Amino acid sequence: MATVVQAATVFHEHCCHSWLEKLVAEAAALGSQLAVFPEAFVGGRPRGTCFVEWLSEDGKEKFRKDHASAIDIPEDRRWERMAGKYGMYIVGGLIERDGQR
């Protein structure tokens, strides 16, 4: 069985992974072997923000928060560990930080 998750991301990286794991655990409890999450679910933009906002002075702070919420790949193995813990596949979008500040 597969579960398609329709949920909004949360802005902070660590909170988002807690939210992700809660949803994965719920899908596993239903018997799912696959959980599919939305684009940019981890490290993504909160609903209602857009790239155009980054052009303003206020938007630069939003961009810094976006960048801080992105994750470093391959160092970040949380999805892999969650998949093993719950015995399922997890598919979803994430925003990767390129390492430059």
Image (cartoon, rainbow, N blue to C red):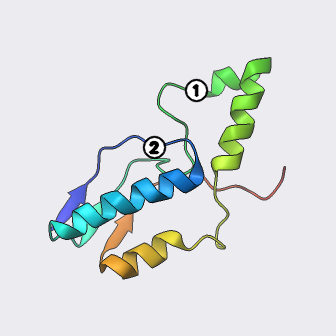
Q: Which residue is denoted by mark 1 in the rendering?
A: 50
In the image, is 47 to the left or to the right of 4?
right
Give the residue drawn at x 64%, y 67%: 73
Give the residue drawn at x 41%, y 57%: 20
| Residue 92 visible in the snapshot | no
Q: Is residue 57 above or below residue 81?
A: above
Image location of residue 75, percent across then percent down: 66, 73
Q: Would you call the spot at circle 1 few (<14 residues within 10 Å), some (14-19), or many (20 or more)?
A: few
Q: Which of 77 and 15 is in front in this view?
A: 15
Type of amino acid under label 1? Cys
The kind of secondary structure element at disc 2 is: loop
- Tell me the CA gap for discs 1 and 2: 14 Å
Dot label at residue 1: none
Image location of residue 52, percent across then percent down: 65, 21
Type of amino acid under label 2? Thr
Check the picture and name the quadrant holding the N terminus: bottom left
Query: Of circles 1 and 2, which is in front?
Result: 2
Give the residue drawn at x 55%, y 41%: 11
Q: Are marks 1 and 2 in contact (CB under 8 Å)?
A: no
The kind of secondary structure element at disc 1 is: loop
Q: Would you call the spot at circle 2 few (<14 residues within 10 Å), some (14-19), or many (20 or more)?
A: many
Image location of residue 31, percent across then percent down: 15, 71
Q: In this view, does 42 lie above or below 54?
A: below
Quadrant location of residue 63? top right
Dot label at residue 9: 2
In the image, is 9 to the left or to the right of 44?
left
Q: Earlier in the sequence, mark 1 or mark 2?
A: 2
Give the residue drawn at x 58%, y 52%: 13
